[in-house]
Image (cartoon, rainbow, N blue to C red):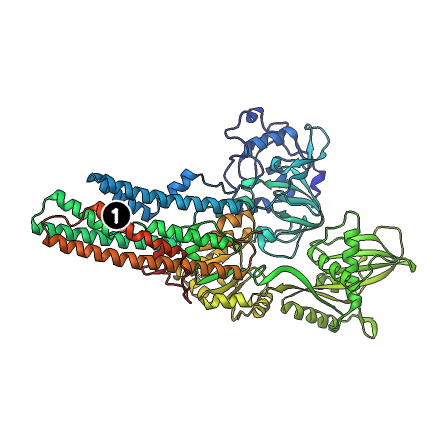
Amino acid sequence: MPDPAAAGDPPPAALTTGAGQALAVTSTGRPPAAGRARPERRAGRAGPPPAAPAELAALAGLPPLTVLRRLAASPRGLTEDEAQDRLLRLGENTVPAVTPRHWPARALRAARDPFVALLLGLAAVSAVIGNVASVALIGALAVVSCGLRVRQEARSTRAAAALRALAASTATVSRRAAAGADPVLREVPVDQLVPGDIVQLSADGLVPADLRLLRADGLAVDQAVLTGETAPAAKATDGHWAAGSALADCPWLCLAGSSVISGTGTGVLLATGPRSYLGTAQLDGAGRRAGTCFDRGVRAVSVWLIRCMLAAVGLVLAIASAAGGTFPRVLVFAVAVAVGLTPEMLPLVVTTVLARGARALAGLGVIVTRLAALHNLGAMDILCTDKTGTLTEGAPALDGCVDAHGQPSDAVLLDACLTSYWAVEAPGGPACGPLDEVLLARASAAGLVLDDGLSGIGLTPFDAVRRRMSVVLAQRDRPGWHLLITKGAVPEVLACCDRVLTGGGVRPLGPDERHRLAALADGYAASGAQVLAVASAERPARAGRYRPADGTGLTLTGFAVFRDQPRRSAAAIGRLAALGVQIKIITGDHPLAVAHVCQQAGIDPDTIVTGPDIEPLTDGQLAAVAAAGTVFARILPGQKARIVAALRAAGHTVGYLGDGVNDVPALAVADVGISAESATGAARAAAGVVLARPDLAAVADAVLAGRRAFGNVIKYLKIVISSNAGNVASMLAAGVVLPFLPMLPVQVLVQNLCFDAAQFTLAFDRADVPARAPSTCPTSPGSCCASG
């Protein structure tokens, strides 16, 4: 592959950015001056439509020189004029946060609630018949209900905004003062980056936008916020990537939001801000979730009340016609009956109950950003979640270091710790990754001395092709020899070894022994562990630089075994099971590793369904598979959303717990999306509930609060509907025998308000929580969703 850095400026052409927006390019290689006129919209406030993942994938699949030409960019960097023009055209490189609604917008959304609309309809009818007092009372109830909802949602929005993570402030960019000038490395604010910029990556930094690598040296990035995988992903300028695979799996593509663990890299930005993969995911997850259990319940109860009112009004008209009453008198009596049937305080009671439940959960570290989510939590009967951070701690721990026969070995521990220590200490070496931190912590606890009589003289960092790293150490007690230690993936390290260290000494590594060692490592992997092989060799001292080819002819010393420790979640899983909430694990991890973690957490994995298994299934077939399965492994983000949608289509109320960009589609589809304080902004925006920590115990507390709110609202409905039905029956009977109206609409309204005011105490009632989720298919006010 030719070196992109050796190429000159691309020829003039009409090129496109990663968002598909054309940039007319002049003979000087920059957009025409007319393009620098006052932009149609101010940069940073709006820009072109977000780039589809397919467009980003198409750019990522092109050779680097072709990508540079498509972007009208040069490997020597953009000029300052070009960068400024593109900034004005495309906007700032800021992932769009979900703009908080102002109070008029919140009030308008609250007024669209069917119960509030029902009250406003009654007020309109009262206005038609000239009953000003009824209009004032009913209107006041509607306004107060809307005000309570607006106030609670504003408070939750401010609390969720306080959890927003900090982003990187600057990035190292290669830019030129003019077209013929030499490139200069400079620090540029991240929000000023544009497609076509040449950006330098280094350890401990963040990937500021989606970029295509032009050069890489031992580059490894943490993509946990995008994929949920805790293991770093190796990145290189070449490798294998099949079209249609996940963008995060592309070895030469680094996505915004990733963090650099080790190595260095240089890349050209493909998409920034809302056009990046992260920005597109956030915008996709920002829409309002439609058709949840709460929404269905609101519609069901509204339709039921309207039917009862129409039936009662029809009965009044029939009775009045038979009695020969006048139309004005009949109309007033019909309005009185309609008012008598309506639970006017229902919106107020429901909002008060849900708001109080949300405030109680806030004290437990659970922030409800949408009041309807609390109800949906109570109705939830299936919780879908990833294993990382919920069933496991989300951080590796050293299970042990073993020799070639699986026996604990201090020698292997020492060699593994030496590689981590001297790699981090080397100038320009990698940042201390999670596995290195674990090893160095164990070395400190064991009192190992890692720098006595040793000095680092060489480092070959980890890369995507070799999948191993090596350090070369000078030994004070052996001045004529250097010690080379290698650590990495088992197959790659074994391929570099021709001997193995055993209890009887060093012996040749034959085919049978290789097979036995590979089987030993596979056995650890099958138990949910991550295994690294450790090997070493002594080399005659020399002054030249050590290269990857020198890491052969090694002696295998053993294996370092790491595990992502399971959380103490068995009790929480038991609580959720007692509440009738079934847990389903949906993850991208290896099936065997997932099965092991589930068994440790007390979940029977039974039959494991994989992504390739569900890909050919129709939606109907998937619904049956999703309902029967418990563990889903090797699942892509789009497949997560399909599984959740299939469960909902089968009549379940589904919650989804996720914290990465890969979880956004499923969070948006679920009845209630649950995220964590440490989640990405896209995940928090798509969720209706934010947890201080991704803990199933907190979810169980939230389910209890939702059930308690549901129970209190159902109590109110049963009390008020039975009372109102008795009042209306009495009014109808009296209307038949009396020559005058038994009650005017305003009298009925005042009576209902006096009775309903006492029901506010239900918001403070610590009701017994039902052991099972209520019915999730509302057909009457007695269903779970009747809490509307």
Q: Is residue 780 visible?
A: no
Return the residue found at the far bottom.
504
Mark 1 Cα within 10 Å, few/some/many (few <14, many 20+)? some
Q: Relative to 623, is 369 above or below? A: above
- 386 shown above or below 369: below
In the rendered image, residue 575, in percent from the top left (x then y), is placed at 49, 66
What amino acid is at disc 1? Answer: Val
Q: Quadrant of residue 443?
A: bottom right
> Which residue is painted at 35% across and 49% down in the image?
348
Residue drawn at (7%, 51%) of the image:
323
Looking at the rendered structure, the secondary structure element under dot 1 is helix
Picture mark count: 1
Of residue 126 and residue 39, the one placed in the foreground of this image is 126
Identify the residue shown where x is 47% and y is 68%.
577
Q: Position of residue 748 (x, y in %)?
A: 22, 49
Q: Does residue 56 appear to the left or right of 4 in the view shown?
A: left
Residue 319 in view, yes or no? yes
Q: Can you identify the residue that label 1 sits on? A: 750
Residue 779 on image: x %, y %: 31, 59
Q: Nearer the viewer, residue 640 or 380?
A: 380
x and y percentages locating residue 190 in the rendered image: 63, 38
Q: Locate residue 124 relative to residue 403 in the image: left or right.
A: left
